[in-house]
Image (tube, grey):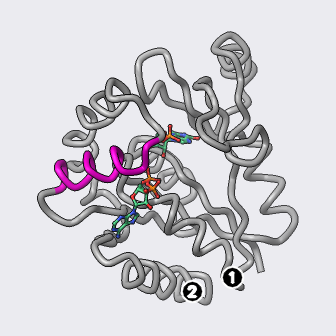
């Protein structure tokens, strides 16, 4: 059976990484598509595991070479993109691809893969902006300036929810994880 794509998008701090990491540990034959970015590693992030960390120049060279399925300047001067080679490699090995991309990238990939992709939007409970800001502060990995940058983008990102196949509200984490698991399992078995 050909591999499928599961696309996760959400405003930063929604708990997307936490939910994605949980799903990757389940027996669903899911593999994470490692994106490329021109931002610096934060915390314990490793090259080739969390991201391929490229310089802005190298990133632009790879755009010019047509190596991206999609890419986005998510924050000014900071590029993020999905490498075609990454997705193709996983599909060729017979596994399913999990992507963690911004809302615009998520819609672009869904457009390209149609029914072969399930797009899931992770949303925090209301009041969304306050909840997100608090989670980012508590995560403790970003400077106040970076956090405010991310918060400024959230209102825009939240307007994209309705374009996704599914919305999962991440209020109580275990419940959100179970809900995401059920949706993904049903889609893969379809
Ligand atoms: P994202 O990948 O969307 O930026 P993370 O998965 O890094 O978000 O989560 C942001 C922070 O919020 C982390 O510290 C995480 O442990 C915490 N978090 C995730 N889900 C919940 C939840 N349901 N309730 C409270 N905190 C959560
Ligand atoms: P972070 O810096 O928190 O890791 O990610 C910031 C944002 O970039 C998140 O919304 C994340 O989903 C998005 N992102 C990560 N990889 C990609 C990618 O390959 N393409 C796009 N379009 N966005 C990405």
Determine the CA span between mark 2 and mark 1: 7 Å
Q: Secondary structure at mark 2?
A: helix
Q: Position of residue 184 (x, y in %)?
A: 53, 80
Give the quadrant of the C terminus: bottom right
Give the quadrant of the N terminus: bottom right
Q: Nearer the viewer, residue 89 or 76?
A: 76
Residue at image mark 1: 28
- The residue that appears at 65% across and 69% down in the rendered structure is 4
Residue 26, image quadrant: bottom right
Residue 89 counted in the magenta span: no
Above or below 181: residue 33: above
Residue at image mark 2: 185
Q: Secondary structure at mark 1?
A: loop
Hey, which residue is sitting farthest right in the picture? Answer: 93
- The residue that appears at 74% across and 41% down in the rendered structure is 46
- Please state if 131 lies on the left or on the right of 97 as rendered: left
- Range of magenta residues: 128-140
- The residue that appears at 60% across and 66% down in the rendered structure is 21
Q: Position of residue 73 (x, y in %)?
A: 47, 24
Crowding near pointer 1: few (<14 within 10 Å), some, many (20+)?
some
Above or below 111: residue 48: above
Hey, which residue is sitting farthest left in the picture? Answer: 127
- Please state if 32 lies on the left or on the right of 6 as rendered: right
Q: Nearer the viewer, residue 163 or 38?
A: 38
Crowding near pointer 2: few (<14 within 10 Å), some, many (20+)?
few
User: Most prominent secondary structure in the magenta stretch?
Assistant: helix
């Amino acid at each position: 059976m050909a591999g499928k794509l599961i696309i996760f998008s959400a405003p930063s701090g929604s708990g997307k990484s936490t939910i994605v990491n949980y799903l990757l540990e389940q027996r669903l034959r899911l593999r994470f598509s490692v994106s490329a970015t021109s931002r610096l590693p934060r915390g314990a992030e490793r090259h080739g595991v969390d991201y391929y960390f490229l310089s802005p120049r190298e990133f632009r060279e790879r755009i010019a070479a047509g190596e991206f399925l999609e890419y986005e300047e998510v924050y000014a001067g900071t590029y993020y993109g999905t490498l075609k080679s990454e997705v193709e490699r996983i599909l060729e090995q017979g596994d399913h691809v999990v992507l963690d991309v911004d809302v615009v990238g998520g819609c672009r990939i869904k457009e390209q893969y149609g029914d072969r992709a399930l797009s899931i939007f992770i949303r925090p409970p209301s009041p969304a902006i306050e909840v997100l800001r608090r989670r980012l502060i508590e995560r403790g990995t970003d400077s106040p300036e970076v956090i405010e940058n991310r918060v400024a983008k959230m209102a825009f990102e939240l307007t994209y929810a309705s374009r996704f196949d599914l919305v999962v509200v991440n209020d109580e984490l275990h419940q959100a994880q179970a809900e995401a698991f059920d949706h993904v399992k049903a889609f893969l078995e379809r």
